Image (cartoon, rainbow, N blue to C red):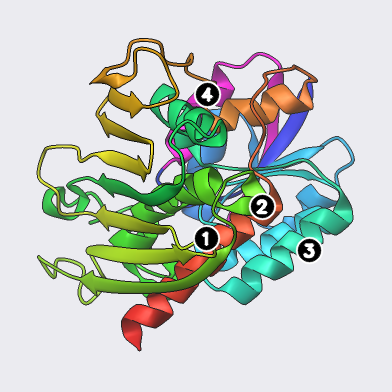
Amino acid sequence: MLTTAFLGVAHIHTPNFINRLNERETVQVKAVYDHDAEHGELRASELGAHYTPELDTILNDPEIGSVVICSETNRHLELVEKAAAAGKHIFCEKPLAISGDEAMQMRDAIERADVVFQMGYFMRSWPTVQFIKREVAAGHLGTITRMRFVNGHSGSLGGWFDSEWRWITDKEQAGGGGFADLGAHALDIILWTLRGACGGPCGEVESVAASLGSATKRYGDIDEYGTGLIRFESGATAVVEASWVDPKLSSPIEVFGTQGQIQVMGKKVRYYSEHVEGADGSEQADLPKEAPHAFDLFWDKLEGKETGVPLVSAEEAAEESRVMDEMYRAANA
């Protein structure tokens, strides 16, 4: 039996993680810490755990081998560094950090402690995304020229952040708005697919640009949508688009190479490749199996299960935050 604890319960995905843990018989949650006692006590009651207002109570408990960090983003630095120093394995909800400098500090702390780390980038488990990663890595698209990932929902239009999750619309606590929130997932997949350090063909990020906007002003001046442009060392470019103001339809993921193209619409994939028999531009039926959710992969790893799906490394998580920080700086220049 694994014993864990929550460090912060502010993130909007916290209820989902609580449900997953309550259904998992091999993990027990002993304690919950949060700076907000009301929220901490509520989540502790849902987990059958006890609330503690003292962070050190959890960090000094030898029974607790891991922590789940779901705090506001601006609190990640303290929580990650202290958890790593205490030798606790870490699941951290995305993004890792607001600034690139803080992201690198956390990366160094995690690597120095040699603890298991996972980030909440659940889109890596999607069959469509795994297909893209596999075919690009195999060289079946030829020289990659462009990639585009659009991630949006109607959060601002529907008032999703009006009450309990309001902090995510506060730049000081979240680092940014819709572009930072949903763009983190799109950026992670682009870097995972194309970046050289992740096994991609395009080398490291060479330069970035971005433009941000707000459509409703429901949450003040925080950005509700944005577009980022990334240029890699190879000359390939990638576009990250994210939005809280998309009313209904999902948008495509696209990858372009000199000898192939992939287009994803929802769960459907159209594929053309000069190197793959049958890849004539029609819909592909032979997709990889959906992998476990990023949260479940963390517990599988701690339980010693072989899933065949790697966790998100601290270096990868830090690079995503660094590039996002650079795009915000470019947009505000």
Quote the CA–CA distance across marks 3 and 4.
30 Å
The amino acid type found where label 3 is placed reads: Asp
Q: Disc 2 and disc 3: Cα gap in Å?
A: 17 Å
Q: Residue placed at 52% from the left, 24% from the top?
A: 20
Q: Could you tell me which secondary element the residue under label 4 belongs to?
A: helix
Which residue is label 1 attached to?
Answer: 234
Position of residue 15 relative to residue 53, above or below, is above
Which mark is nearer the camera, 2 or 3? 2
Q: Position of residue 18 (x, y in %)?
A: 52, 31
Q: Is residue 16 magenta?
A: yes
Instruction: Report if residue 326 lies within the magenta region.
Output: no
Residue 100, above or below 10 = below
Badge 1 or badge 4: first in the primary sequence? 4
Q: Marks 3 and 2: in contact by CB < 8 Å?
A: no
Q: Which mark is residue 20?
A: 4
Residue lying at 14% horizontally and 49% vertically, measured from the top left: 246
Nearer the viewer's eye, disc 3 or disc 4? 3
Q: Which mark is residue 197?
A: 2
Residue at (67% x, 18% y) in the render: 307
Q: Mark 3 sits on what residue?
A: 108
Label 1 SS: loop
Q: Which residues are magenta?
A: 13-35
- Residue 162 position in % (x across, y down): 23, 56
The residue type indicated by label 1 comes to Ser
Quadrant of the rendering where the N terminus is positioned: top right
